[in-house]
Amino acid sequence: MADLVIRPSIKGIILWYVLSVFLLIGIVVFLQTRGFQPVELWALLVFPLAIDLWAALKHIRLNSRSLTLHGDILRYEDGLISKTQRNIILDKISDVNVAQSIGQRLVGVGDLSVEAMGESGNITLENVDRPRQAADAILDAMRQSRKSNR
């Protein structure tokens, strides 16, 4: 069976990129109506650039977090330059939770939380696409692991 990789959704980041494009178009149209004068108005371009920079940093941060279901192990990785990795044997998982706010339900994302016996703290991955299906896949792998170990 191929590894299942679960990552946070970038739907929210795409919204910020689209907002930035509309803001940039609006500023360029505004500048054009003024004949691109005075030159100080060009400073308005800082706003969409700041939004793009923030969104790009957030995008990179989201891509640096993942849950991977590999055989009998659920691996959580976090970090881009320095990485943190936690491995949980599927037999030790006690619960898999999905939490969705109204806004998250509207766009089809949710927070996925894995609780393990004897481990320090839960593993939570925010804004996962199709969180119920991801939770079901983890639970199914957990059940199969427990059946094969009996």
Image (spheres, rainbow, N blue to C red):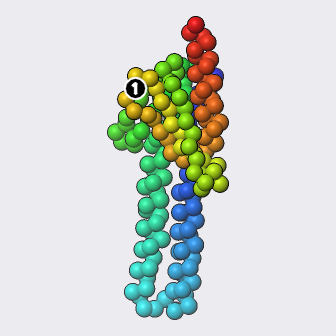
Instruction: Name the foreground residue: 91 vs 94.
Output: 94
Q: Position of residue 129 (x, y in %)?
A: 61, 44
Give the residue drawn at x 49%, y 41%.
Answer: 125
Quadrant that contains the N terminus: top right
Q: Position of residue 34 (x, y in %)?
A: 52, 92
Q: Position of residue 131 (x, y in %)?
A: 60, 40
In the image, is residue 146 above or below residue 19? Answer: above
From the image, tell me which residue sits under label 1. 119
Residue 8 in sight from this viewpoint:
no
In the image, is residue 24 above or below residue 127? Answer: below
Residue at the top extreme, as displayed:
150
Quadrant that contains the C terminus: top right
Instruction: Name the foreground residue: 99 vs 13.
Output: 99
Q: Which quadrant holds residue 47? A: bottom left
Tally the marks.
1
Q: Secondary structure at mark 1?
A: loop
User: Is the residue marked by circle 1 packed among few (<14), some (14-19), or many (20+) residues within 10 Å?
Assistant: few
Q: Position of residue 50 (x, y in %)?
A: 42, 67
Residue at the left extreme, as displayed:
82
Give the residue drawn at x 58%, y 21%.
Answer: 142
Type of amino acid under label 1: Glu
In the image, is residue 11 above or below residue 141? Answer: below
Give the residue drawn at x 51%, y 25%.
Answer: 94
Q: Which quadrant holds residue 130? A: top right
